[in-house]
Amino acid sequence: MRVKHLFICLLLFISSSKGWCQLFQNRNLYDIWITAEQYADAGKFNEAIKLYEAAPQVPEFARQLKITRQLQTVFQTGERLYRAKKYAEALEAYSKYREIAPNLHTAILDARIQTCLQQLDKVLVKKIAESTRVVAGFEYAYKGDTKLLELDTLAALGYYNKARQLGGNLNQTLREQYLAGLQSVKALRKWGEDYRRIAVTEDKALTLDILRKYRSASKYIISTLEYEIKSAEEGQRAILGSRSQGNPTERMNQYAQDCRIEDLAYFVKNNSSFIPQAVSTSRLVDEYRAIEGDIARLLKDPGNGPFLESAYRNLIEKAGQIPSVGGTIQLCAKKLYFEYLYGQAVWSEKEGLENGDKTRYQEALRYSMEAYQLGLSELNTDLEVLQRRIAAQLDCEDRRQDFENLLVGIRLDLSQCQVKSAKTRWDTAAARLSGCGLNNSQFSAQYIALRDSVYQFYIADSSLVSLTARGNQALDTRKCEEARGIIEQIQNLWMCDPGNRDSLLLQYRDRISQCEQLTCYITNRNKAIQSAENREWKKSYDYYQQAYTCASETQKLRIKEIMEDMECDAYPDRCQKSNVSVSLEPSVRIGINKPKYTEEGKAWETTYGYLTSAGLQVSFLSYLNPLDVVLGLDYFQTEYQSVDKGDPKGDFKISGADAYVAFKLHPTGTDPNRLRPYLKGGFEVLLPMSYSLQNHYKNESTRDRSLLKKQSLGTLAALGIELQKKKFGFFIEIVGGYNFSGIYNANAVSSSGAKGKTEAQFRTAGIRVGARLW
């Protein structure tokens, strides 16, 4: 341990030197590189060039600077033709960008090429120059290859056929490319049919064998299928199903712990419906893998060192953004960075030994210090061995005065609770001694209390960050009890600034209260829904009542509506109120009318005519009393004939209002959710408003309303059934009526035209239905 502390002192001393600043001064180079790529993709080549010129000493920047200048030249040439609507020539110009570098993709140029291809589609093939046809053919063949990698054989077939249509035999390389593509499409389709046929059998061994055979069918290695093969070989399913017992979170954690980021990416994409935040997780994992790919390319040139440092730090930062497994993937990223830094330190040490160059040892220390700061304690054993070897090669000078001068800043930082800054200053101050005094007990005794305060506060701050992250995760997953235990740990931390901790605790207590409230609401609501699906109305109502106590104001409004609708099903006795409720019900009646008709005291036969009516009725309902009162008002219309020995004498048509009052007798104490029978009887008043008579004897007609009484009394009776729930009701009844007072007044004229005693008394029968929707 003494050797380790000595080496840390040496390491931190060197970290304050000029050489260290030069080595790690470009922490944002990767961000600059990404921004430059975005500028180039958008066609802003001048802006991209300016960014690449910021670090021409970095080989990757120099390479990209050269490529971007070439892209700008290609784009400017093509753009002049494009704006002149010379799409064939523009296509040839734009397509030259693919010759600049392998696997080069620039969004603005790809978009322009696509537009040019669309314009050429409007022109007959025979009218396109051969050189343009070859270029367009290569572009379509390239699109076909891209679609094959996505297993979209339908789109790939279309693109390869387009390449054949345009290129034909004009170019041998193009011909070989599209013929190979067409052959791959055919082989992959045949393979796909075999795979689908075998997959339904759920024979794992046979399915795996078919999966592997895609490699002979496709001219490309397809990552999604490779993932499924690997998953099958491991005895896991690449895609979760309803019968799968796999937990997606556990599977994701396993991939993250094994640093199998590619497998994780495909697993998330294949199982997005099972994984929370699948869209953002997939996007961030893809971005992480893109940075990994950039690092792999940058590692090929040792001159990219400062650039790589920035890229690795971006990789670590990106890993931390991934939901659920970000912390685990961060460890993977840190291990990759550690391997790079350790390798660089070993190489610098070797150079120092071979050349006797002390600066190489300092460089090795700088790399090892960066590795040490990653906090991977499990890897520090090899690092300590390396550090001891390097420390033995360096001279040690007395820098006690520098150390004491730096302590002023440490005390100032602690007074302002800038704990991280104080820790950095302490490490730097210790490095000033370079092991030449701090290990002296007499010298170091006076600084032990300060050192302990710095480290204790630093540990507390680090613990606070870790506990805060765990608390947030617990609250996000509604593990309220776990979160409550975490805030108890936070409360026991010895912080430099307890006010900040206490403020955080207040926020957490509020969030825990919300968590418990939300958990209470969701749990009881889900139980209520399940009970309702099982038609256990009382249990469902009670669960909703418990959910109501935990609900927000908006949620309470919704639950209140549900409970009101469910109350009569859950507790029928609550709806059997002794007081009378009023119900407004639209109703329709359809029936027959066969009046009792007399002229001059002689009875005449009448036909069965129709009777229709529609209107509103008001019911005064009671569940405990046997009698209800009904008031109604309808508009009615009826037609009938009087006949003489089978021949029509006159056609009658009468319409008007029908007002009635009735009493409804029903069983008492009935359940409002069930049908109940009733008898109804009462009186009605007809108020004729129009009258029409067609006299067939005299071939005359009249519409004289004065022939009728202004009102006519009658009786009605009905037998029916009804349902009167809390917010819905309906009834259907067989109803009959007799108009005992007649409809004609003393001035009535008979169908024969003579004045005398003429009367008609309606005798009706029919069906009346009504409903209540509130």
Image (cartoon, rainbow, N blue to C red):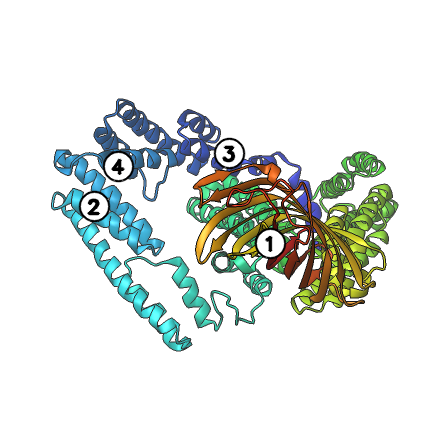
Above or below, comparing residue 83 to residue 254 in the picture: above
Q: Earlier in the sequence, mark 2 or mark 1?
A: 2
Q: Which of marks 2 and 4 is nearer the N terminus?
A: 4
Q: Where is residue 178 in the image (x, y as percent from the top left)?
A: 20, 50
- For mark 3, what is the residue? 32
Residue 589, label in figure = 1
Q: Dot 4: few (<14), some (14–19), or many (≥20) neighbours within 10 Å?
A: some
Looking at marks 4 and 3 on the same chain, the residue that comes earlier in the sequence is marked by: 3
Residue nearest the viewer, comparing 89 with 9: 89
Identified at 41% across, 34% down, the residue is 41
Residue that appears at 32% across and 49% down: 146
Which quadrant of the rendered structure holds the N terminus?
bottom right
Residue 85: assigned label: none
Q: Residues within 10 Å of mark 1 (few under 14, many from 20)?
A: many
- Quote the CA–CA distance across marks 2 and 4: 11 Å
Mark 2: amino acid: Ala
Q: How far apart are marks 2 and 1 (CA)?
A: 74 Å
**Front: mark 4 or 3:** 4
Mark 2 or 1, closer to the camera: 1
Q: Is mark 1 on a helix, strand or loop?
A: strand
**Label 2 belongs to which residue?**
163
Secondary element at image label 2? helix
Would you place residue 184 above or below residue 697 in this image?
Answer: below
- The three-letter code of the residue at mark 4 reads Leu
Q: Closer to us: mark 4 or mark 1?
A: 1
- Nearest to the observer: residue 498 or residue 733: 733
